Amino acid sequence: MNLPSSNPTESKFGRSAPGMVALAIMAASPFMPLLLAVLPAPLAYARLRYGVGNFAVAASVCAALALAGGGSVGLFAVVAALVICGNALGVSMSAGEPDDRTLLRGTLIPALSVGAVLAVYFLANGVDPWAIAAKDMDASVSRAVGMYKRLGMSQADIDAALPTVKLWMRVMTDGLVAVAFYTMTATCVMSHALLRRYAVKAGLVKARAEGEGLANWVAPDHAVWGVIIPGFLMIPDVHVLRVAAGNVLAVFALVYLFQGIGIVSYLIGRLKMPRGFRILLWAMVLLQPYLFLTMWAVGLFDTWVDFRKLRKKPDSRDARKA
């Protein structure tokens, strides 16, 4: 007699014919993460051009695919977040809202709604998502160690690398909320960039006016408290408080990373750098984490220094809405 699993989050992938088919498709497609990452773009286009009815059909197809995967809670939550993100992008763009507000809605609405539902689900079933994440990461490290051994890596080299790996594992586990928010933000930004480019060509939305865009975007001044207050809350040696404050700080740090990227874009435009040099520069930024930290610091200090002198202009308030 087979007893039901005590873990309510266990995936039922492979227990049914549809589940096996969905698993085979996902395993056979190395582009599946990329396809999921840009899923909100076609959903938002359906909402933007064809209205609520066609968007509902497209969303239902996505939900059916998630259910065909065997009812995995994680997969269904991901698809639900992407569907909500697509609807938020479509609604905001059809209303003619500026890009920063559109991206904010597209990120916050799915993150908060799906996050709240998952929190209720985990609490009701007595499941600790952080424990699950730690267990999955331990399994990933074990598989990686086995692979390196088969490739001929010495045990001494593996032992030397493990402390750093375990440190990153702890950071990723403690920052689970921030990691989920970062992933949702990256997905929203990619989908919005793809959708807006096509929607402008199709005449569905207006092109940006001169002076709009990330290069002239300024974060609200009061957002800096989202970095300062959690920073002070991380000083006491209380693990729960540090984890909660660290997640909040990481989320607000993303705002100033975008502001730092905007400053770099502004400088590139002012210097009129060749296209090839721009591509090389951004490739270096993507490959070098320290440059990300530098841009975050530049974006944060721009609150006081105002590198682009946008706050001193009479129309700076309009520039912030770009």
Image (spheres, helix red, strand yellow):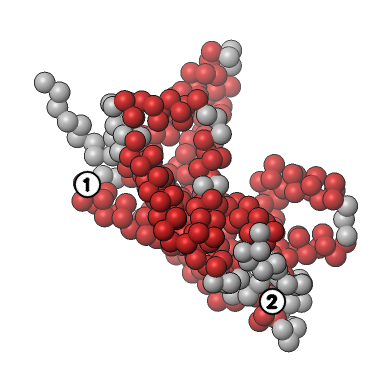
Corner quadrant of residue 111: bottom left
Asked where in the image residue 262 lies, by quadrant, the reply is bottom right
Q: Which residue is mark 2?
A: 319
* Most foreground residue, 15 or 291: 15
Q: Nearer the viewer, mark 1 or mark 2?
A: 2
Choose the circle earlier in sequence order: 1 or 2: 1
Q: Residue at x 40, y 55 (%)?
A: 56
Could you tell me how far apart the alpha carbons at marks 1 and 2 are, in whole angstroms? 47 Å
User: In the image, residue 249 lies at what x, y percent?
Assistant: 50, 61
Which quadrant of the view contains residue 243? bottom left
Q: Position of residue 37 (x, y in %)?
A: 53, 45
Q: Nearer the viewer, residue 254 or 237?
A: 254
Horizontal arrangement in the rendering, residue 128 relative to residue 276 (left or right) = left
Q: Please say if 117 is above or below 105.
A: above
Q: SS for tag 2?
A: helix
- The residue depicted at 61 percent of the width and 55 percent of the height is 195
Residue drawn at (30%, 38%) of the image: 71
- Extreme-bottom residue of the structure: 314
Report how many numbered discs are placed on residues in the image: 2
Badge 1 is on which residue?
Answer: 126
Residue 21 visible within the image: yes
Question: Dot 2 surroundings within 10 Å: few (below 14), some, or many (20 or more)?
Answer: some
Residue 252 in sight from this viewpoint? no
Which residue is situated farthest in the left direction here? 1
Three-letter amino acid code at disc 1?
A: Gly
Q: Position of residue 156 (x, y in %)?
A: 56, 19
Mark 1: few, some, or many residues within 10 Å (few <14, many ≥20)?
few
The residue tagged with tag 1: helix, strand or loop?
A: loop
